Image (tube, grey):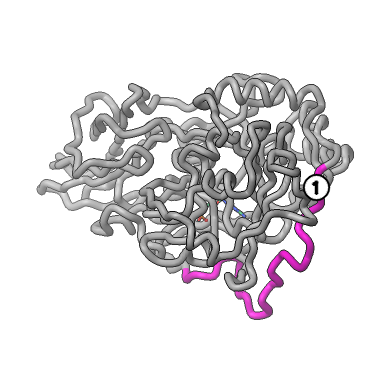
Amino acid sequence: MVDQQPLDERDYDRARLRQWRAGLATDARLTRRDVARLAAGLSLGAGAAAFAGGRPPAASAAERPAAPEAQAGPILKPLPPELFTVFGTNAEMRWEAMTGAGHLVPVDRFFVRNHTRTPVVDAETWRLRLFGTGLRGSPTAEAPVEFGYADLRRLPAESVTAFLECAGNGRSFFGGQQGQSVSGTAWGLGAVGVARWRGVRLGTVLRRAGLTRAAVDVQPEGLDPDFVSGGVNLGPVRRPLPVVKALDDVLLAYEMNGRPLPPDHGFPVRLVVPSWIGIASVKWVGRIEVSASPLFSPWNTQFYRLFGPDYPAGGELIDRQVVKSAFELPWNASLPAGRTHVLRGRSWSGNGRIRHVEVSTDGGMTWQRACALGRGEAAGWQRWEFPWRPGAPGAYTVRARATDVTGATQPAQTSYNTLGYLFGAVVAHPVTVV
Ligand code: MTE
């Protein structure tokens, strides 16, 4: 057994930033020149160029699934326009698709965020390979501790209802509402979904693999193709987790909403890291490095950090999601005048349950409590409704503002960051009364 203090995320982030600045960030897959080019392309500053060094080799071709010849696009499931807005390799859920859809988001409308494309993995031959200096005997990437799909399914199973949300969800409102230009996929608010996940605790697998007290970071790696950005091959999608979080509530999930994981959502096995930004929940996981020294990847040094005038040089690491709300309405919805409409929506937070939600229909001048529907989960969402009888026909905006158990409330503005993460400000949703 490994005894761990509870995770203080701020301390963890500060320590990693110090280590990164000191040149401790290492990755065998990238040269210093690659990183300097990448940093220049992303305007990240000189700090990013500290990133180079020696890491285990990437998964061999034999471990990676081959691209099926007939694969039509980066996402395999149908993406009908009434359910999704497609952005390249990604697809955002339309919020109106949740009207009457129940508490969980059905797979047919759950958003997809792919850095490259959905791989087709055969569960029969799939192996989860664990290695690194944080495991007993320091197994190497070439001679790892292995688990098959059936091995995982034989271990004690647990379920959790949790949201999965991209760190960039709401990014388009930096431009649309705050007049700021940021880079990245221009998501509205639909890069989020709540599902019931079932699988085995990552902690169970780590302990069976020989986790030692020396372990500090755990890095899952996807079997999808390498991600190339600005002409630089960054290798497979991977991002380290502190071992304390890994042992807390993280699942190696093999079911979503009561069925085997669909290919686009990580079949056969993915991580589900409740309350954290979506990148932590690595899909199609093939390898996990468990290390006695800090791990770094482009996904915690160059991306998924807050860069900008309000943040330290080198940026600030992000993990936990902020409070957000959305209406189950089309953008620019048309509502008939002269009758009462029940506006419905959902609010969620990475800090825990939603305490209450307020709605404004007069441009944010006055706010009234929405009525909670059922009891939301700590890592899921709270549904709510609000009856509204609009006055004369015309253009309106409706706003929802949630407060979570920690007292955190959605602000009027989100601090600018160059990559457009964590947009938690109240969104002005346009509605036309006709
Ligand atoms: N894992 C792998 N291997 N490859 C990816 O591209 N995208 C991440 C995460 N895990 C990604 C991944 C991001 S940024 C998000 S938001 C979630 O998966 C999206 O999960 P979903 O596509 O099942 O909704």
Residue 355 vs residue 198, the one in the foreground: 198
369 lies above or below 130: above
- x and y, in percent, of residue 284 in the image: 59, 59
In terms of secondary structure, where does tag 1 sit? loop
Asked if residue 78 shows in the view, the reply is yes
Determine whether, in the image, residue 134 is placed left or right of residue 77: right
- x and y, in percent, of residue 64 in the image: 71, 65
Residue 161 vs residue 251, the one in the foreground: 251
Determine whether, in the image, residue 274 is placed left or right of residue 313: left
Range drawn in magenta: 55-78
Residue 100 falls in image quadrant: bottom left
Determine whether, in the image, residue 12 is placed left or right of residue 189: right
Residue lying furthest left: 339
The residue at 66%/26% (across/down) is 315
Q: Residues within 10 Å of mark 1 (few under 14, many from 20)?
A: some
- x and y, in percent, of residue 332 in the image: 34, 49
- x and y, in percent, of residue 278 in the image: 52, 45
The residue under label 1 is: 56
Determine whether, in the image, residue 237 is placed left or right of residue 357: right
Q: Main secondary structure of the magenta part?
A: loop
122 lies above or below 23: below
Residue 382 falls in image quadrant: top left
Residue 301 falls in image quadrant: top right
Q: Is residue 72 one of those drawn in magenta?
A: yes
Residue 390 vs residue 36, the one in the foreground: 36
The residue at 72%/40% (across/down) is 297
Instruction: Name which residue type carries label 1.
Output: Pro
The residue at 66%/35% (across/down) is 215
Where, quadrant-wise, is the N terminus in this rendering?
top right
